[in-house]
């Protein structure tokens, strides 16, 4: 992993936590974090979608957040398709 990738990972983790801090009972989409980190005005944030999902998985492993589907927590390794992220309840 390059320094740039490591920095992006840290930015995504911070973005997830900051977005959830603003709305503690809400859920966010990984795309919200990707858009927060990507500075451009084009669709370049899409390249950050998988890194944002990985950041959510790391934060889940650390006990900071939960990954949900259909409003229910799911095991990160079993999540397929769209996910949401929320603070641990």
Image (cartoon, grey):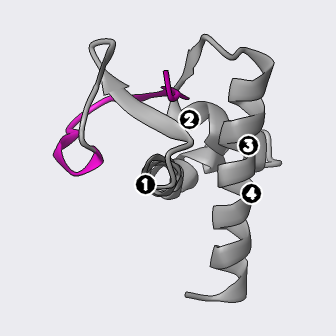
Q: Tag 2: Cα neighbours inside 10 Å, few (<14), some, or many (≥20)? A: some
Q: Is mark 3 on a helix, strand or loop?
A: helix
In this picture, residue 73 sits left or right of residue 29 = left
- Any mark on residue 11, and which? 4
Q: Which of marks 4 and 2 is in front?
A: 4
Q: Which of 46 and 55 is in front in this view?
A: 55
Is the Cβ of the residue at disc 4 closer than 8 Å to that at disc 3? yes
- Any mark on residue 31, and which? 2
Disc on the earlier residue, 1 or 3: 3
Q: What element carries label 1?
A: helix
Tell me the distance, in whole angstroms, between the alpha carbons under discs 1 and 4: 17 Å
Q: Tag 4: Cα neighbours inside 10 Å, few (<14), some, or many (≥20)? A: some
Quadrant of the rendered image containing residue 4: bottom right
Q: Position of residue 66 (x, y in %)?
A: 43, 34
Is the Cβ of the residue at disc 1 closer than 8 Å to that at disc 2? no
Which residue corresponds to mark 3? 15
């Amino acid at each position: 992993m390059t320094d740039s990738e490591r920095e992006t990972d840290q930015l995504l983790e911070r973005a997830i936590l900051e977005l959830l801090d603003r709305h503690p009972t809400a859920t966010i989409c990984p795309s919200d974090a990707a858009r927060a980190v990507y500075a451009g005005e084009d669709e370049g944030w899409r390249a950050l979608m998988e890194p944002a999902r990985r950041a959510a998985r790391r934060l889940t492993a650390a006990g900071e957040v939960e990954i949900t589907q259909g409003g229910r927590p799911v095991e990160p390794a079993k999540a397929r398709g769209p996910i949401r992220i929320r603070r641990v309840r």
